[in-house]
Amino acid sequence: MAESMSDATDTETMLAILASLLEPPIPQQAALLDALISAKGDVEAAASSLRARQPAQTRKRIASGVLDSWLTASPSESSQLHKKSKTSITTKIVSSQAHNDESSNTISVVPLKDILRPPPLSVPAVPRLAPLTLSNPMLVEKHTPCTLHLSVLPPELASRLFYVMVNASKEWTPNKWWLFDRVVESPHKTAFYIRKFDGVTDDGTWHEAAQYWYNGRPTATPSVFPSEMEEACQIIENIVNHTLQSRRRYPLEWGGCSNGFDRQTWKANVAASNCYTEGGKEGVGFHSDQLTYLGPFPTIASLSLGTSRTFRLREVIPNNEADTRQAQTFNIPVVHNSLVIMHASTQERFKHSIPPQRAIDVFRSSYPPPPEMQMERELGTSRINITFRFYRPDFRPKSIPKCRCDIPCVLRANMKQRVEVEDMHYFWMCYAGAQNDGKGCGFVKVMDCESEGRGPFMGDREPSPAVQSS
């Protein structure tokens, strides 16, 4: 009997049931969830959909002939199989030669691979794309919806902010959340900061939103921007707003306030900070940033300080294009005092990560650390990442729907089902599993901007020419 998301069955259980109905290789959890949502919670329908679009070249092929068995057998088994295979193959070839001798004196030569292997698949596999390193701002802008900016802060300020954040990171902690009935934690330490005034509205409830910034788990009230971070933020805001003037804008982007505040500018009011201290061992896997308080098509400015690492991007291929192209990975080296701006559509089309590295360069600043930090050896291998974000006024805590667990939902983009980026659909879903022993209620609801009172959006304003399409 088909199961529905409206039943009491929680999402994780439904995902497990769906996975049990499929043959290996099992799709990733995100693909299973997309299939469930598209099937409106019908597990059997979701399984049928996944089976139908599974590429032929990835289906499990049953080995035929004795060659495959001989190649995968142990040494003792291999010798026994070799004896059997030698007899079998010799018999077939001799039989074929005898038949040819009766009909003609000419023996046709057949390639050995045609005898020992099945014919190739009629449909060629979609070619894999090699990872591409984007080593300069021009390449980053050409291949991704991001822009790379080098030496964004005055050198003295960049070093001073780095030292302040490394010292503060001693009190930071790894993030923890539930995943498949177990508690996992991030390999790096994190902290969240809020700006005293966001410069957009007089509504201060975004301070409350900052307490639920990671996986919906309540945290202590975040600290206010240190003076060095505030100084850097003002510089970065100018860079972001100057860059936005030449960018394509999407209909669901924030359209600005009409109460006297500047409608044109991007204002950072929160910042997520990460510290990687153990050289290249620490990293973070592929993910897209939560949209719950950012809203659709956010702009996020990511500042790197300290040792160089690789910022990795990989596009999420929609289902309707899965048979024609594969995702490509882009590696962007992020050095000290560099800024990556993840523009609108990055969170809807790509996932990003910081992969572990076997070797990294030791960071040496032209400005020495304060006396109390000069003996700290980890300074040369540490990286600080500060992502400045804008929590939108139309996505403040009081407007976020709650699931049946009475927990604020999380907002996600339906990345796999998109046809055009402008037509992206978003849905609210239960996120109690992040803090409730990994169990939730399975609540899912499509976001309806009009009935939920969202906006204003860029699409509500007079259209401006699209300068570029990235």
Image (cartoon, rainbow, N blue to C red):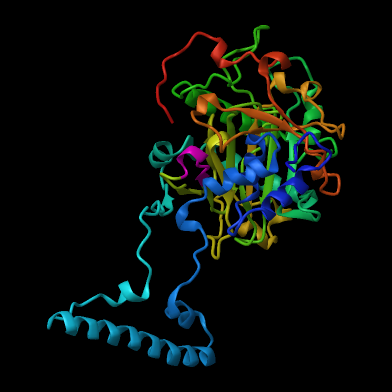
| In front of the other: 393 or 53 | 53
As drawn, is 190 to the left or to the right of 233? right
Please name the residue shown 66% across and 53% down the image. Answer: 21
From the top left corner, tell me how far across and down residue 209 is, in percent.
Answer: 78, 29
> Residue 444 lies in what quarter of the image?
top right
User: From this viewpoint, is residue 161 visible?
Assistant: no
- Magenta-drawn segment: 313-322
Examine the structure image and report whether residue 82 is included in the region drawn in magenta.
no
Location of the C terminus by quadrant is top left
As drawn, is 416 to the left or to the right of 435? left
Please name the residue shown 58% across and 19% down the image. Answer: 265
Location of the N terminus by quadrant is top right
As drawn, is 288 to the left or to the right of 126? right
Q: Is residue 24 above or below residue 255?
A: below
| In front of the other: 339 or 33 | 33
Please name the residue shown 76% across and 14% down the image. Answer: 202
> Residue 218 lies in what quarter of the image?
top right
